[in-house]
Image (cartoon, grey):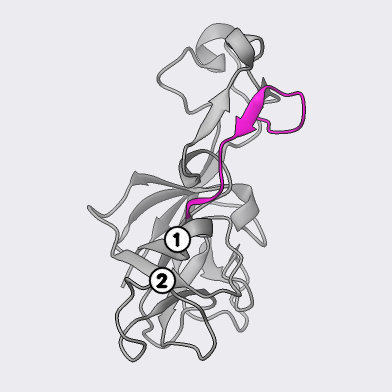
């Protein structure tokens, strides 16, 4: 769904042209690569001999890498998400998560921010980030599990085989994180069990 900067480095490294072939959901490992013949880019990108792409791929051998800050809902869309229907007829909250299916009352006012611009923001500084489950290929099981970027897609995985250097360390699954409204734990004494996102520590470069 999206990357959630929790206690990150002060600023992202910047925005970079996204390879046209890269389909991202937010939170994947992205690496910088040189220009690719036939790949389209906006006019505000410097000359083709100088600009770099964010490529959802593995990071290895000292490559500059980070987490891609894009997504399909919430923080990662151009205008966020509408919660509720006309005159607040429904909330769109079910089973511990906001749902976007027809009739749920939650409507994505997208598209994803990278869809129009062709760019993605790359967070490279060490820090704590939240990543939703759809950015994982395999979910970590315990604190301090090493996390890698899957070589084919950049999705996060605990499998080191052929997936480059360690990119992050798993911290914990986070549920019922809201501090703005009354949480389920405060209202009922029981926390929601379905994780909203997974906290990881980006090692950075």
102 is within the stretch colored magenta: yes
- Residue lying furthest front in this view? 43
Q: Which residues are magenta?
A: 98-113
Distance CA(mark 1)–CA(mark 2): 7 Å
The correct choice, above or below, for 61 with respect to 98 in the image is below
Task: Characterize the local packing of mark 2: few (<14), some (14-19) or many (20 or more) Cα atoms within 10 angstroms.
Answer: few
Q: Give the quarter of the figure containing the C terminus.
A: bottom left
Q: How many marks?
A: 2
Q: Is residue 27 visible?
A: no
Residue 91 on image: x %, y % = 63, 16
Position of residue 12 measured from the top left corner of the image (x, y, whole percent): 29, 59
Image point 32% across, 71% down: which residue?
Answer: 44
Does 134 sit above or below residue 60? Answer: above
Q: What element does badge 2 sit on?
A: loop
Q: Nearer the viewer, residue 89 or 58?
A: 89
Q: Position of residue 50 (x, y in %)?
A: 30, 87
Q: Which mark is residue 42?
A: 2
Labels 1 and 2 touching (C-beta < 8 A): yes
Tell me: 205 left or right of 24: left
Callout 1: SS: helix
Residue 89, relative to residue 142: is it above or below?
above
Residue 170 position in % (x across, y down): 49, 55
Q: Earlier in the sequence, mark 1 or mark 2?
A: 2
- According to the picture, the residue beneath numbered tag 1 turns out to be 117
Q: Nearer the viewer, residue 165 or 26?
A: 26
Residue 169 is a magenta residue: no
Quadrant position of residue 67: bottom left
Q: What is the chief secondary structure element of the magenta stretch?
A: loop
């Amino acid at each position: 769904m999206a990357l959630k900067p929790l206690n990150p480095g002060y600023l992202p490294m910047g925005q970079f042209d996204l390879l046209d072939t890269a389909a991202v959901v937010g939170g994947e490992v992205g690496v910088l690569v040189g220009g690719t013949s036939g790949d389209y880019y906006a006019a505000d990108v410097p000359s083709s001999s100088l600009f770099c792409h964010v490529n959802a791929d593995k990071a290895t051998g000292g490559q500059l890498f980070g987490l891609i800050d894009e997504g399909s809902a919430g923080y990662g869309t151009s205008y966020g998400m509408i919660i509720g229907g006309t005159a607040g007829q429904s909330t769109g909250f079910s089973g511990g998560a906001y749902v976007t299916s027809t009739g749920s009352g939650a409507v994505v006012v997208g598209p994803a921010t990278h869809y129009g611009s062709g760019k993605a923001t790359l967070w490279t500084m060490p820090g704590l980030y939240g990543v939703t489950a759809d950015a994982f290929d395999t979910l970590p099981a315990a604190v301090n599990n090493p996390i890698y970027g899957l070589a084919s897609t950049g999705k996060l995985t605990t499998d080191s085989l052929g997936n480059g250097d360690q990119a992050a360390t798993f911290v914990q699954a986070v549920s019922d994180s809201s501090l703005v409204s009354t949480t389920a734990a405060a209202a009922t004494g029981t926390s929601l069990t379905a994780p909203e996102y997974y906290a990881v520590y980006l090692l950075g470069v």
